[in-house]
Structure formats: C-alpha cells, structure tokens
Image: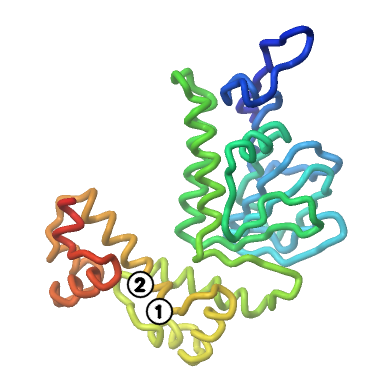
Amino acid sequence: MELLEYTRTGSSDNNEKTIENFPLAKATEKHISIQRLNYFPGLGNDKHYKILWILRGVKTVMINDEIFNSYPNLLVLISPGQKLKIETTEEPEGWILRFSTTYLNLLRHENFALGNVNLFSDSDKIPKIVLSPKIGERIHSLAGMIDELAGSHIPKKENAIHSLFKAILIYCDSRCNVSLDKNANPQEIRIVSNFKQLVTDNFTRLHMVSDYAKIMNISPKYLNQIVKQIMGVTAKQVIQEQIIIKARRELKFSNSSIKEIAFSLGYSDPFHFSNFFKDSVGSSPTLYRNR
C-alpha cells in the first residue's frame, strides 16, 4: 500500500535547492510504503531502504548470502540492493516498510542517531534486533498509525508520519531488545526471547527470577547469566522495568488509587510497592502522579 509521495519543488537558476531549504513534506522525493508480510513476493535489486518486522511464521531470513534464524518480534534493517528472501513455517505475520535514500538523508541532516543500533551504515553488517514483546506491540501500533494517517486528509499529516517513523527507530534502541550478530547462539537467544515473553505475560504476579527459571526448567543462575550476557542487564532488571513502565502509566493515566495499582501489580503491601517505586524512579508514587 503506497503511503506517501512528494515532488521536490522550488528551483533557482535551473538548480534544485538543497534539502536544508525545504521542510520534510516538500523535500521528500520518493515515497514511503508499507506492505504486509503475508503478501511478500521477495525483494531483489530494490533501491529503497527497508525495515522488516516479523511477528511470527518465519523460519529463516536470507539477506544476500547471509542466512540467519528468525525469532518472534525480529526486526531487520535492510539497505538498497540487498536481496531479501524468507522461509516461512506458516502464514507469516509482520510488515515491510520502505523509504527512500532522500528520506534517510533527511534523518541524518536532523542529526538523528541511535546509541546501540547501527542505522543503515555502509558496512556489510546487517542490523538485526529481537524486540522486547511490549516494544514489538508498540512498533506494530506505530506502523498502523502511519498507514492510517497516510490514507487520511488530516492537516500536516506528513509531520506526524515523520515523528512516528522516528519513534519506531527510537524504540529499536531499547536496552530490552537483543541485537543479533553472526556469533549469536540460537539456543541462548530463544531462552532470552522466551523469558521476555514470559515476563510480558506474568510480571504483574511473578516478580522473582526464580519464578521464571522454574517455568523454563533452568536454574536462576543460568537464566541470569544468559540474560546478562545477551542483553547487558540482569533478569531482575528486565522484570522490574516492566513493573515500572506499567506503574508509571497507571499513575499518570488512570484514576486508580496507589493501593489499587499496587495490588494490580502483584504487591500485597502498598508500602512495599511505594518503596520499590521510589528506589527505581527517585520519587514516591504520589509525587510522581502529582508532578
């Protein structure tokens, strides 16, 4: 589905003005498009940059001659000319978002950069990220909003689409994601991915690393070791981050009392929840809600 297409205007002495002299909506020469993965025909010799997002249903991904395993919530950044093939196990779910070289240059002109993600560099390395399940949900929602805005007549929708696109890339830089490389151990990646999904599904009632290790039939020490090795944070930090994200949201955007929020997050004693929140955020739940 084609989303956007703009034509560069405003020449002087038969020379086009530089990108710097144009706002985004007028400077973008190419279009941005998004396509559902289950209609994917395969790509080769494509002049666009691409973001491939896989929710499920894909066994392997091939970029040129490099083949790697797929995982739920896998995101791959693909440069122009790189050939893409996927091997499916069922009807795949996900999407491919294409955008032009000009658009990427606009991002770079805005000094847009990420800390941990290699954003379409000129090297042969293909950035591959296994997203946290919650971040995968957010990225999927952002892509849907881009698609919705593109088909609308909302004023200044181009600026909104630009912001949503950057938000997708920023979410890719979360410490809860896993960056894959050629030395990545598939079994360890699966363990970490499974752990993150279990945390997403159970963090409101299971707060201990040992709870998840028991479900996964491995030792807490081994689980923490693998998570630390692959993600750079402890398994406990992954659990606590989910609790804090949910607590912040409830404090800011719900009318539930702090006691009710504590109970909903699995704390039988609101005092313990308040101490945990203050240690993590730096302020009490009451101060955070009122500021």
Q: Is residue 125 left or right of residue 134?
A: right
Q: Nearer the viewer, residue 75 or 8?
A: 8
Q: In which quadrant is the N terminus drawn?
A: top right
Judging by the rendered image, the residue that carries numbered circle 2 is: 240
Instruction: Name the spot of residue 249 as percent of width and height, x first.
Output: 28, 54
**Which amino acid type is marked by label 2?**
Gln
Farthest residue to the top: give it.
13
Instruction: Name the spot of residue 189 as percent of width and height, x first.
Output: 62, 74
| Circle 1: element type | helix
Few, some or many residues within 10 Å of mark 2 (<14, 14–19, 20+): some
Judging by the rendered image, the residue that carries numbered circle 1 is: 236
| Quarter of the view holding residue 191 | bottom right
Q: Nearer the viewer, residue 13 or 32?
A: 13
**Marks 2 and 1: CB-CB under 8 Å?**
yes
| Circle 2: element type | helix
Q: Is residue 145 above or below residue 211?
A: above
